[in-house]
Structures are given as C-alpha cells and as structure tokens.
Image: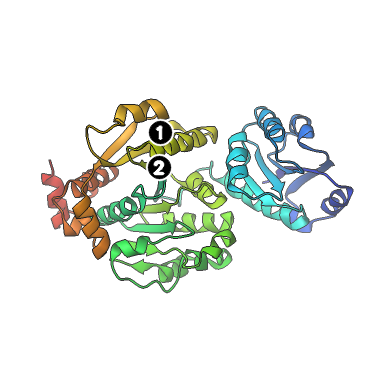
C-alpha cells in the first residue's frame, strides 16, 4: 500500500537531506517542504497526507493551538512532532492537540523512517486482523498507590482459573513489581530484553521469556533497571502485544500513571481500559485529568471503565461525585479489605487462593465472570464451583 507522507522542516539542510532518494521507501509518496506549524493547515488541505512530520522549533501554546486547529480538518492524520523537548507535560499537551507521537530532534532520514514505521503500525490498528484473537485489558492507576497492580495480578489469576491462557505484561517501566504478587518467581528475562529484539520476536522467544506461574498464567516481568524505560520503542511494544494476543486468550497490561509515549501506545492497543482510583480528592482530580486526556485522544466511551478500589460507604467523596466530576460511569467497586489484601501482597499469594471468601476475592470473581462466558468455563475445578455458587 502506497503511503502519502508530508514533511515540514525548518532548515534548508534538512530539506536537502530528506529530498535525497530513499530506495527503502519506494512505497511512500514523500513531499518535503520548509515551514512551521503555520504551514500545517495548507499542507493538509493541498497534499491530503496520511502521515505528517512537523519539525517544531517551539512548543508553546500557540504552536499547540495551530496543530489542534489544523488536525480538525483531517482528524485521522498521523502527525509526528519532532522536538528537542521530550517532557511528559509536552507529551500530554501534544496528544490533546492530536499529535500521535513526539520524536527527538533533529529531524534526519532515520527520524523519517522511524516515524513512517510507527505510522504504519498505528494505521494498521484500525484494520481487522483475523489472527489477533486475544483480548487486551489495560489497568492504569489514577495515582500511584491506587492498587492497580494488585488488581491486574489477581484479575489475571482469576481469568487463568477459568481455563483461559493469560499473559501479564508489566508495563510499569520504572518500578514494576507485579511478579512479587505471584510468589518467589525468578525472571530470567524481562520486557526490555524482549522489546529490543522486536526484529526476531516469535512465539518461541516469547514463551521462553515468560515466568510460568501456572500452565495458564504467564508473566513478562518489568526491567529491574529504570534507565531502560526510555529505550523501549513503540514499535517493539506493538510487536510484543500483537504476538501475545495471538497466543493468549487475555493479555493484561499493568501500567503506571505516567502518560509517557510507551504507556499511551499501550493504551491505544488495549481493547478495554480500567482506570483504578480511590475515593480521595487527589485521586478524583487525577482521574478527571486522565479521562479528559482519553477523550481528547478520541477513545470511544465504551473503551474506558472506572474502577473504585478500597471502597467504603459514607466517605466524604461519593460515587455520585466521581460520576459527576469525570462524566463517566463507574464500572465496579472493590471493597476495602485491608487485612486480607495486605496478607496476599506480603505473602505473594493471590487473594483468591489465600482468602477465597473475602469480599475482594468475590469482586474479582464477578469481574472475571463478566469477561468470560460461563459456557467457556471448565466445570471440573474448585474455581468453577465457587463462581457458580457466588452470591
């Protein structure tokens, strides 16, 4: 498929470099011009590109408003911003404006090729992929400490007990510790090791990199080195998620609340996003901002669900307050059960095994039961019986 790509650069030197022949881009119709964000509307109208690379010298609010206005003409355009600023604040504002990714300056031929590869990955997401059958579920906390990792680990365990093959990808890139929730397992490989081998990634390599909690539950641990977080590419992550969903019934993504480029890409790939929060003012404020970010990014309303964790009735902030503030429906509540949850976390034993009659365990059973039709559940195990008799 021929891809129409427009590049707006800000120097004559860059213009000359990008206009040179690129044999490896034979299937790309490339148009290069000099200009700025002010040039963007006319480029989109005249050239009607599928992909735009904009060389941004400034990242002020005026630039963001120009981009936002221009993309209203063609909201499906994949716009990559080339900028020396790689901060989270710029990422958040740029994504709200419709930017799909931010690549580091300066703009070069390698940058062009990288942006085109990423754009192809993004554009392919909207096309049906018959080989991709697994459901991708993302859990993201409104704020740190919301309990999203505990819920991700234990929901994955519940789904595996329903006879489903489940992969958990620990995408808390800086301080991921989900593997601790499943006992004293040792990870010989991790997400960083696998993502950087995207060019040779296959089912055998994926399987050998997983920690096997059980026959049905496999975990890909986070890297122990936070500095690796910036080295994981969006393309590598896409390859990993795509391959995982081909070989597992469910792929559970455990994310941090930091909306960096990898986290945002992971959220794009998810079929369902669960925003985990608590009934506190800081958590409510953070949840509102994240929901707004999701809507600005164009996520459909049914892709996002709010989960209120550690719920207790009669608090200062009510569920009604959450719905009104976020303009979102609350999907479910998980009761506060400090002793049972603490015991589960500290012993590394899933709460469904340690305290199966605890309200939190029962809430996880209900959650898993909604995701897996009972007609698909093996009947001859203790977990099925617990589900069948759950109130």
Q: Give 54 or 58, whichever is nearer the viewer.
A: 58
Q: Is 271 rendered above or below residue 176?
A: above
User: Which residue bears the numbered disc 1?
Assistant: 302
Where residue 109 sits: x, y (%)? 77, 56
Look at the numbered discs 2 and 1 and tell me whether their residues touch, using CB distance below 8 Å.
no
At 48% from the left and 46% from the top, the residue drawn is: 267
Callout 1: helix, strand or loop? helix
Q: Is residue 299 visible?
A: no
Q: Is residue 225 visible?
A: yes
Q: Give 131 or 272, whichever is nearer the viewer.
A: 272
Q: CA distance from mark 2 to mark 1?
A: 8 Å
| Disc number for residue 272 | 2
Q: Which quarter of the rendering shows the C terminus?
A: top left
Q: Give 47 or 263, whichever is nearer the viewer.
A: 263
Where residue 246 sits: x, y (%)? 43, 56
At 55% from the left and 64% from the top, the residue drawn is: 227
Where residue 301 sits: x, y (%)? 43, 31
At 16% from the left and 55% from the top, the residue drawn is: 355
At 51% from the left and 63% from the top, the residue drawn is: 226
Q: Is 225 rendered above or below residue 288?
A: below
Where residue 101 sits: x, y (%)? 62, 46
Q: Is 86 rendered above or below residue 37?
A: below
Q: Which corner quadrant of the image does residue 307 belong to?
A: top left
Pointer 2 or 1: first along the chain: 2
Q: Give 80 or 86, whichever is nearer the viewer.
A: 86
């Amino acid at each position: 498929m021929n891809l129409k790509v427009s590049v707006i650069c800000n120097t004559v030197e860059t213009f000359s470099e990008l206009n040179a022949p690129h044999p490896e881009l034979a299937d790309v119709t490339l148009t290069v011009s000099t200009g700025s964000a002010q040039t963007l509307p006319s480029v989109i109208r005249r050239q009607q590109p599928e992909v735009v690379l904009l060389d941004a010298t400034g990242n002020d609010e005026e630039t963001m408003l120009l981009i936002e206005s221009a993309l209203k003409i063609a909201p499906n355009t994949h716009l990559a911003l080339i900028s020396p600023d790689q901060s989270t604040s710029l990422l958040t504002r740029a994504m709200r404006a419709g930017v799909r990714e931010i690549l580091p300056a300066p703009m070069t031929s390698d940058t062009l090729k990288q942006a085109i590869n990423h754009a192809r990955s993004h554009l392919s997401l909207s096309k049906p992929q018959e080989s991709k059958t697994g459901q991708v579920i993302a859990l993201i906390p409104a704020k740190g400490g919301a309990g999203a990792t505990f819920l991700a680990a234990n929901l994955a365990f519940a789904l595996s007990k329903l006879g489903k093959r489940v992969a958990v990808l620990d995408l808390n890139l800086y301080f991921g510790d989900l593997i601790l929730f499943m006992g004293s397992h040792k990870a010989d490989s991790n997400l960083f090791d696998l993502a950087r081998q995207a060019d040779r990634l296959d089912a055998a390599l994926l399987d050998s990199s997983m920690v096997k909690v059980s026959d049905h539950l496999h975990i890909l641990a986070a890297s122990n080195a936070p500095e690796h977080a910036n080295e994981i590419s969006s393309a590598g992550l896409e390859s990993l998620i795509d391959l995982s969903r081909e070989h597992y019934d469910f792929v559970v993504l455990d994310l941090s609340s930091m909306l960096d480029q990898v986290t945002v890409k992971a959220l794009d790939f998810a079929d369902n996003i669960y925003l985990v929060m608590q009934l506190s003012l800081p958590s409510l404020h953070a949840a509102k901002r994240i929901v707004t970010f999701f809507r600005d990014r164009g996520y459909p309303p049914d892709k996002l669900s709010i989960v209120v964790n550690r719920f207790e009735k009669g608090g200062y902030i009510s569920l009604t307050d959450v719905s009104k503030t976020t303009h979102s429906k609350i999907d479910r509540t998980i009761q506060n059960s400090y002793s049972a949850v603490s015991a589960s976390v500290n012993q590394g034993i899933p709460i469904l095994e340690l305290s199966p009659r605890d309200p939190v365990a029962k809430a996880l059973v209900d959650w898993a039961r909604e995701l897996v039709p009972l007609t698909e559940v093996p009947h001859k195990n203790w977990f099925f019986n617990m589900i069948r008799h759950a109130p």
